[in-house]
Image (cartoon, coloured by chain):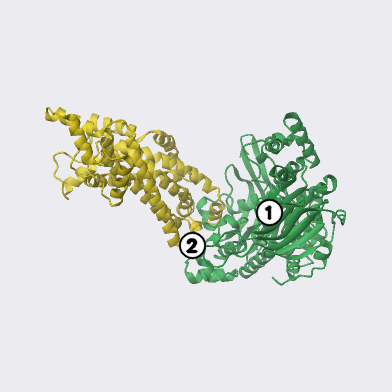
Chain colours: A green, B yellow
Amino acid sequence: MSVLEIDNLHVGYELAAGTLSAVRDLSLSLAAGERLGLVGESGSGKTTTALAVMGLLRAPGRVLGGQIRLDGQDLVGLDDRAFAALRLARVAYVPQGAMNALNPVLRVSDSITHALRDHGAPADANRIADLLAQVGLGADVARRFPHELSGGMKQRVCIAIAISLGPRLIIADEPTSALDVVTQKQVMATLRQAQDRLGSAMILIGHDMGLMAQCVDRVAVMRDGLLVEEGPVRRVFHAPEAPYTAELIRSVPVIGQDRRAGTAAPAAAADLLRFDGVEMRYGKSLFGPPPAPALHKLDLVLPDAPRILSIVGQSGSGKTTIGSIALGLLAPSAGRVLWRGQPLAATPPQTFRREVQAVFQDPYSTFNPFYRVAHALSVPLRRFGLATGDAARALMEESCRAVGLDPSLLDRFAHQLSGGQRQRLMVARALMLRPRLLVADEPVSMVDASMRAAILDLLVDLRDRYGISVLYITHDLATAWRVGDDILVLERGHVVEQGDPDQVLRAPSHQYTRLLLDSIPMPDPDRPWSTAA
Amino acid sequence: MFLLRLTKRLLLMLAVIFTAASLNFLLPKLAPKDPIETKLLELTETGGALTDMKGLVEAYRAKFGLDRPLAEQYLSYIKDTASLDLGQSIAFYPARVTDLVGRALPWTIGLLLTSTLIAFALGTVLGALLAWEGAPRLLGLLAPGVMVLAALPYYLLGLVLIYVFAFSWRLLPLGGGFEMTAIPGLRWDFVLDILRHSLLPAASIVLASVGTWALAMRGMMVTVQGEDYMAYAEANGLSVQRRFFSYGLRNALLPQVTGLALHIGYIAAGSVLVERVFQYPGLGNLLFAAIQQNDYFVIYGVVFILVVMIAVLMLLVDMLYPLLDPRVRR
C-alpha cells in the first residue's frame, strides 16, 4: 500500500483579485522505502505541495480540491491539533536552511527533547545520544549550541530530529543546498541510511538534477504548478519525455563538456593583481597560541589581460577571504597585495573602487529594498562622477541590454525581481563602471538552475566583449571548469593545486582535488557517487 | 575569560561613576543661586531680626567649605564621596546627607524597581501576544490603548490618576508614603497602609511604561516569527506554548533586555517627577526639594546614589545577558 497518495491536488491563494493557483491537478503516489525527487524552479509549486501535505499552508493559501492520503487517511481538512500531532510523528521535515533552523538559544539536547516530549515520547540522555549516533554525531554534540556547529553538523541534527519518532514519510526540502559538495555527499548518505533503516518514504525537493540522479528512485518534475513529467529515475534521465526535463538535465554543467575558455594571455602581460605571500588571521587571542590562519602564504597572479580565474574549495577554505582582500575590504595580516604594480594601500581609493567591482552570493540582500533599481544603479555613477540625469539613465539602459534584461526593470523595486534578474542587474551595475576586475563570489549558488548557465555566460561575455578579468569564487567545480581560464584549488587556506582547468580537473594530482571531484553528483543515475563517503 | 570581562566591565563602571560624579559637582555650581543666602533668608523670615547678615553668610560659607577655591572643593568632594561621606545638608542642617538618602532609598527602590519590573514583564508578554498569530482576537483591541499609554508621560498619568481615584472617588490617598498618623512598624495595618499609598504611583509608572515595552516587544516578535527556527518548530509539531515561550518570546526577549539596561537611566529620571507628584518620600522627591533650595550636598548625594544604582544595574544586566544568549558567551 502506498504511504502517500496525492489525487488531483489543487492549491491556490485566494486573493482579492481572484484565485492564484500554485499547484494544479497534481497526482503522485509514494510507497514505503521509496525516494521521490520533486524537481522544479522557485515558483513551480514543489514547496507548496510539501506544505500542503504537512498542513502548513498559510492564509490566503489553501487546498482548493483533491485529496492527500497518508496511509489511507485523508489529510485535507484536518484541524490544527491533528496536523500538529501528525507532524514529525508521521511526516517529518528536514529543512532547507538548517543554518538557521535550530533555535539559537537552545542546546542541541533541548531541541531534540522538545521534539520528543511534545509528541509524548520520553527523552533522556541515552535516547539523545543514540539519535545523534545514528546520524554520525558524537554524544558531546548534545551539549553544544547551534552556533558551535558547522553547517553539515546542523543538518545532521535536523536529520536526527526527523527520524526520532520513526515517521512514515520524510520530506527533505533542499537539505543540502547550503552545503559544499563534500559535506553534501556525506549528509545525503546519512539521510539515505537513516531513511533506509526506518523503511519510510522520502520526498527530496530540489532543483539540482545531479543530486536527483544520485539520490532518488523516481523523479517528478514540476513547472508553474503542473506536473510536467514523472517516472523512474533512469527512464527520466535517459529518455526524458518533456522538453523542459531535458533542458533541466542539460543545464547541469559537467566537467569535460562545454568549456568556454578564452584566449591565452600574452606571455609578457603585466600584472593586474598580485598576491605576494598573503596571509590572513582572523581575530586575536590574548592568551594561548595565535589563531590558525585562514590563508597561508598565498601567491596569486592575475595578468593584465582578460582572464577568468576560478577559485574553488569547501566552506572554510579561505576562498571568500581572497575575494575580500582583492576587493580591498580586508587588509591581509602579512604579505603584499599589488594592484597594477602598485601596493594596494597606495592606490587612490577613487580609482581602485571603480576598477574592481563585485557580485555577491545572495541576490536577495544586495539591493536596498527602499529604492527603485534605477536609483541603486545610479549611485555609483554619481559617486565616481561618470554620469548624471539622462546620461546616467542611458548608460544604465545600455548595461541592462548588455546583460539581456529589459531596461523597464529599472523602474521596479528589487523585491519585484527574481533572483536571476537581480544577479544580472549586479553584473550590469558592475559593467556600467567599466571595471578591470570583477570579483564574483558564488554568484550562482542561490539562483535557479536554468538561470545559472545564463549568468555564467555573462561572465564569459564580460571577458570576451568588454575585456574584464573575473575572479570567480565557487564551491562548484563544474562551473569553475566551464568558465575558468585558470583554476586554483584551496584547502584550509593552502593552495593544493593550480593551473589549467583541463589538467587540474581532468587529471588531478592532489587527493583533495580528487575528493572534491568525486563528491560532485553527476546528472546520470548510472554513474553513481563513488562509495567513499 | 569571564574574570577578564568582569574586571574590564567593573573598571568601566568606576569610570562612569567618576565622570558622572564630577559633572554632578560642577553643574550646580553654574547656577546663579546661592544656597547660604537662601537658607539665611529663610531663617530671617522665621527667626526674626538678624544683624551682620554679611558676616553670617561668610561664616556659613566657611563652615561648608564654600569659600575655598573650586579645585580644592572638587578634590575634597571626590575624597569624601570615595569614602562614602556625602556631607551635611545645607537646608536641613545638621542632618547628614547619608541619612537623608538612606531614609529615602528604600522607598524609591521598593516603588521603582518593583513597578518597572512589573511593567517590563507585563509589557513583554503583552507585546509578544500582540504579535502572535494564534492569540485571541480580543487582544488586538488592546493595541491602540497600549499605544496611547506609551505616548503619555509618567507624571501626567499620575495627575489623572490622583484626580480620579484620590480626589473624585476618594478611594486611595492623595499622596505620601504612609498616613501621618500611622506608627511605623512591621505590622499588617502599616504594611497595608504603605501598599495603599504606593498603588497610584506604581500604577502610573506601570501604565505609562507598559506600552513602550509592549510596542518594542511586538516589533521584535514579528521579526522573530519570520525566522527559520519558528517555521521549523511548527513543522516539527511542537506545542503552541512551547513555540510561543521557548522559541518566540525567548528569542525576542534578547533585544528587550538590552532595552531594559538602556532604559534604567530614563526610568530614574522619570520617577523623580512621579515621586514629586505623589509627594512620595523617595529619592526623587528629596532631589527635587534639594534642587529648589540649591542644597548642593543633598543634590550631590542623591545624584551620586542614582548614578551608582544605574551603573550597578546596567552591570548586572550586562553580566546576566550571556546567560540569556549563548552566542555572546566567550
Q: Is residue A240 above or below residue B295?
A: below
- Say whether residue B41 is left or right of residue A104: left
Q: How far is disc 1 from disc 2 in space, using C-alphas?
A: 40 Å
**Quarter where residue B137 is shown:** top left
Q: At label 1, which amino acid type do we have? A: Ile
The local crowd at label 2, few if under 14, some if 14 to 19, many if 20 or more residues have their Cα within 10 Å, is some
Chain letter of the residue beneath label 1 in the structure image:
A
- Say whether residue A284 is left or right of residue B138: right
Q: Residue furthest left?
A: B48
Q: In this view, does A484 lie above or below A350?
A: below
Identity of the residue drawn at 65% across and 50% down:
A329
**Quarter where residue A320 is shown:** bottom right
Tell me the tag on residue A325. 1
Where is residue B63? Give x, y as percent: 21, 40
Q: As rendered, which of B276 and B96 lies closer to the eye?
A: B96
Q: In this view, does A329 lie above or below B288?
A: below
Where is residue A416? Give x, y as percent: 67, 39
Labels 1 and 2: the sequence-earlier one: 2
Chain letter of the residue beneath label 2 in the structure image:
A
Q: At label 2, which amino acid type do we have? A: Asp
Q: Can residue B200 be seen in this view?
A: no
- Say whether residue A431 is left or right of residue A173: right
Q: Mark 1 near mark 2, Cβ–Cβ under 8 Å? A: no
Q: As rendered, which of B44 and A51 lies closer to the eye?
A: B44
Q: Mark 2 points at which residue?
A: A110
